[in-house]
């Protein structure tokens, strides 16, 4: 007998209650507010708040009524959120300008960089980067956009492009560390190519012309105002004799000098700082703390320093060697401006304090090698000295000719002079 096909049915399973998991309270938020009457006209409002560490904690406030207690509780919870890191409010949809504000705050809290460097980074961010990125969401800042921006800026100025890349990398790196964006697009942009430029140094005739121009300016007839006190010429001699930065020379104190020993020395242990909104002052270390060094002085620098000390009225060991008429520090910008004005009047171009530093480095490199030149400049890496400060001599050591002659030279043929031998 044929039995018609019957569709099989799955066996029925016993019914079980399934409890759905309650979603966790997001960090920085609170759950349901409950109220309790405390009697005597007082009421308490209570809620569980999830702190930054992920823990739920009970927070309560009291008031004369349930509404007043709840308002006090909400105010307390809003203040509690202020103690959380500022990036809590950042997401991939946040504007770049919000990241910049937090990045600046983070640098200040970390306090790893000097104030001068932080101000420089802030200026570069606001002037070079922000105009092109401030209205973009963080998720919209990708490799292609950053690469195009850096390349376009490099066509106008290599240094500006390099400075913009530095601050962009730092700000976006902070967003990566705090898991706002998955990667730093600056890590994948094309490498900047530094324009080929050899360091420049003064030749001996140029140094003589610079000295003559300063001396003529200082000895010129004065019809009004005070006569120059000779400091500019003495500063130039100190720059030549130490190869120090202009800020380091202007920061030399009387106590930093030892002119009585067999070998006069100066200790370079500070620099002059001029920041916006602050008076010019002496910083207690040079550009880096590792740049502190003691330099033996050549006699021409000793003579200039002794002449300056004869004109100093103060015997305070902490007094600056070079100073204004009130004893305060000279600004590096004023010295540069004064030197440039005098050189322009004398028809000399390209005379800057830093070029004296390169001149000294080149002189020591040619006579004593790159390690000695790096030590004089206060560099920990001689490659910096080699790349940026010394003028390379393209004359190869003539001893190579002797070496090649010993290996491949042929004796002269009888009856013919060596000069007549074929090349």
Image (cartoon, helix red, strand yellow):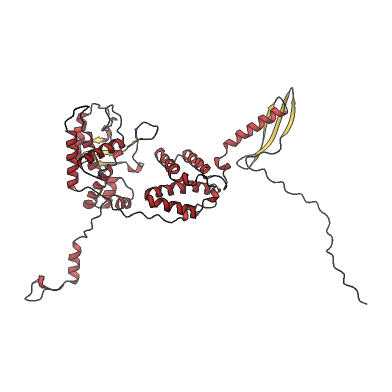
Query: In the image, residue 200 lies at what x, y percent?
Result: 26, 50
Look at the image and tell me in which quarter the C terminus lies.
bottom left
Residue drawn at point x = 84 percent, y = 57 percent: 14
Query: In the image, residue 297 lies at what x, y percent?
Result: 22, 41
Residue drawn at point x = 60 percent, y = 33 percent: 79
Tell which residue pokes out farthest to the right in this image. Answer: 1
| Quadrant position of residue 221 | top left
As drawn, 325 above or below 294: above
Q: How many marks?
A: 0
The answer to whether one can see residue 251 in this image is no
Tell which residue pokes out farthest to the left in this image. Answer: 415
Compared across the picture, whether 141 is left or right of 36 comes to: left
Asked whether 207 or 317 is in front, the reply is 207
Query: In the image, residue 49 lies at what x, y percent?
Result: 66, 38
Asked whether 320 or 335 is in front, the reply is 335
As drawn, 3 above or below 251: below
Query: In the image, residue 276 lies at what x, y percent?
Result: 39, 34
| Quadrant position of residue 349 | top left
The answer to whether one can see residue 48 in this image is yes
Look at the image and tell me in which quarter the N terminus lies.
bottom right
Compared across the picture, whether 23 is left or right of 125 comes to: right
Residue drawn at point x = 32 percent, y = 53 percent: 383
């Amino acid at each position: 007998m044929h039995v018609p096909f019957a569709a099989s049915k799955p066996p029925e399973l016993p019914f079980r209650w399934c409890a759905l998991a309650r979603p966790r309270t997001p960090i920085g938020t609170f759950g349901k507010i409950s109220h309790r009457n405390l009697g005597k006209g007082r009421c308490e409002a209570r809620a569980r708040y999830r702190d930054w560490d992920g823990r739920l904690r009970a927070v309560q406030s009291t008031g004369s009524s349930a509404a007043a207690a709840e308002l006090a509780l909400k105010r307390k919870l809003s203040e509690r959120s202020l103690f959380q890191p500022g990036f809590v409010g950042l997401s991939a949809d946040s504007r770049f300008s919000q990241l910049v504000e937090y990045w600046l705050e983070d640098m200040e809290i970390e306090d790893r960089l000097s104030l001068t460097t932080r101000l420089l980074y802030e200026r570069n961010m606001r002037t070079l980067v922000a105009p092109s990125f401030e209205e973009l969401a963080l998720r919209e800042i990708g490799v292609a956009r950053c690469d195009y921006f850096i390349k376009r800026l490099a066509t106008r100025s290599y240094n500006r492009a390099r400075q913009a890349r530095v601050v962009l990398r730092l700000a976006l790196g902070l967003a990566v560390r705090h898991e706002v964006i998955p990667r730093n697009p600056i890590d994948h942009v094309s490498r900047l190519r530094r324009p080929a430029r050899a360091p420049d140094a003064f030749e001996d005739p140029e140094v003589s012309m610079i000295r003559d121009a300063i001396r003529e300016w200082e000895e010129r007839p004065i019809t009004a105002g005070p006569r120059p006190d000779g400091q500019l010429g003495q500063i130039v001699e100190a720059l030549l004799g130490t190869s120090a930065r202009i800020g380091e020379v202007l920061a030399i104190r009387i106590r930093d000098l030892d002119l009585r020993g067999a070998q006069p020395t100066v200790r370079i242990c500070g620099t002059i700082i001029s920041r916006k909104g602050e008076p010019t002052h002496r910083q207690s270390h040079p550009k880096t703390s590792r740049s502190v060094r003691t330099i033996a002085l050549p006699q021409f620098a000793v003579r200039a320093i002794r002449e300056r000390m004869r004109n100093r009225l103060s015997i305070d060991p902490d007094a600056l060697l070079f100073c204004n008429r009130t004893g305060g520090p000279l600004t590096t910008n004023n010295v540069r401006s004064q030197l440039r004005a005098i050189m322009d009047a004398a028809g000399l171009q390209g005379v800057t304090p830093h070029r004296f530093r390169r001149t000294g480095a080149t002189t020591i490199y040619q006579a004593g090698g790159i390690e000695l030149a790096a030590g004089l400049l206060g560099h920990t890496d001689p490659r910096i000295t080699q790349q940026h400060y010394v003028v390379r001599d393209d004359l190869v050591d003539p001893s190579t000719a002797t070496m090649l002659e010993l290996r491949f030279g042929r004796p002269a043929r009888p009856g013919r002079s060596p000069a007549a031998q074929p090349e």
